[in-house]
Image (cartoon, grey):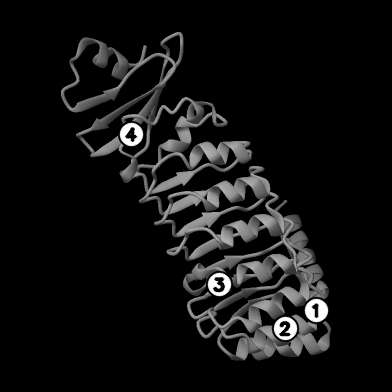
Amino acid sequence: MNPFLDAFKKGEEKDIELIKQSPGSPLYYKDYNNGAYVIAIINESFEFQYIDKKALVFLANMVNKGKLLRKKVNKGIDEENIVQLDLQRYDFGPLDIKYLTDFDLKNLRILDLSSNSIKPQGAFYLSQSKFSSLESLNLNFNEIGDEGLNHIANGFFNKLNCLFLFHNNITSQGIKYLVKAEFVSNLIILSLSENPCIGDTGVRYMKEHKGWGKLSILNLNYTGLTDIALDYLGKAPMPKLKKLNIQGNKFTDQGKANINALRMNHIHVSYRTEAERQKEKEKNKRKNKDKK
């Protein structure tokens, strides 16, 4: 048996405030020794699992594919103190997002929902949330598509400054929706990698928008770009852009000249030609062979 559970049963633990305890539900308490909130799960057999989460990053451990969310076991949690949630790879679907938004997480600043399957409907529920303090949103690998991005663009995320949309079936139409979002003017990091149908047209929509004043990092790897997109990027109103990732796109010699022009403008451009990639690959092979 876990010593913490023994202490609770005997009432001997003086430094811990017991907030809630019931079989089949989480056990919440505050550890006065380190000021951390701690969550523990008690199943029907009253077995005890102790999980220490110090930076108030504990809701993720409470969620078991949404089951505990459906039970509304958040009663007794000080929701205002939850500032970060890591919910990647929880097999969340649209309804799980709906249940998640029932939490009044008004001080939530970082939300990672990557590698789930929330789809456009889940993006809609997320856009209706009360997460008004959200600064970083990771939706990588969620199949939200253009429709889902439209919902996010119309959400109440006025403080959002980091948005990750890797591999989401987004096309140029999705970018057309995105540039209309009020939070675009606050974005510092925008990742759109592995959405191969964004293409030059999507970058043109970005160039035509004037609200990229804070954007510092832009990830456009494998987004179907050509030399035309590089010309757009050179003219885009992104005065603070410092890092541009454009791997996996096809550029000609003229495009490479545009890349050099971007680099001359103090932008770190991450791009290697196929010949350069093969050269690096051979170099790594030789290194590994030498090690053996």
Q: Name the residue under label 4.
A: 77
Q: Is mark 2 on a helix, strand or loop?
A: helix
Residue type marked 2: Leu
Q: Of tags 4 and 2, which is closer to the observer?
A: 4
Q: Residue at x 68, y 52 (%)?
A: 144
Mark 2 and mark 1 in contact (Cβ < 8 Å)? yes
Residue type marked 4: Ile
- Residue 230: mark: 2
The residues tagged by marks 3 and 4 sit, at their Cα atoms, a distance apart of 36 Å
Mark 3 and mark 2 in contact (Cβ < 8 Å)? no
Q: Where is residue 166 in the image (x, y as percent from the top left)?
A: 66, 58
Q: Is mark 1 on a helix, strand or loop?
A: loop
- Which of the two discs, 4 and 2, labels the residue nearer the N terminus? 4
Q: In this view, does 291 lie above or below 86?
A: below
Residue type marked 1: Thr
How many residues crowd around disc 2 within 10 Å: few (fewer than 14), some, or many (20 or more)?
many
Asked whether the viewer can see residue 165, the reply is: no
The residues tagged by marks 4 and 2 sit, at their Cα atoms, a distance apart of 49 Å
Q: Mark 3 points at which residue?
A: 217
Asked whether the viewer can see residue 70, the reply is: yes
- Residue 226: mark: 1
- Which of the two discs, 2 and 3, labels the residue nearer the N terminus? 3
| Lateral position of residue 234 relative to residue 159, left or right | right
- Which of the two discs, 3 and 1, labels the residue nearer the N terminus? 3
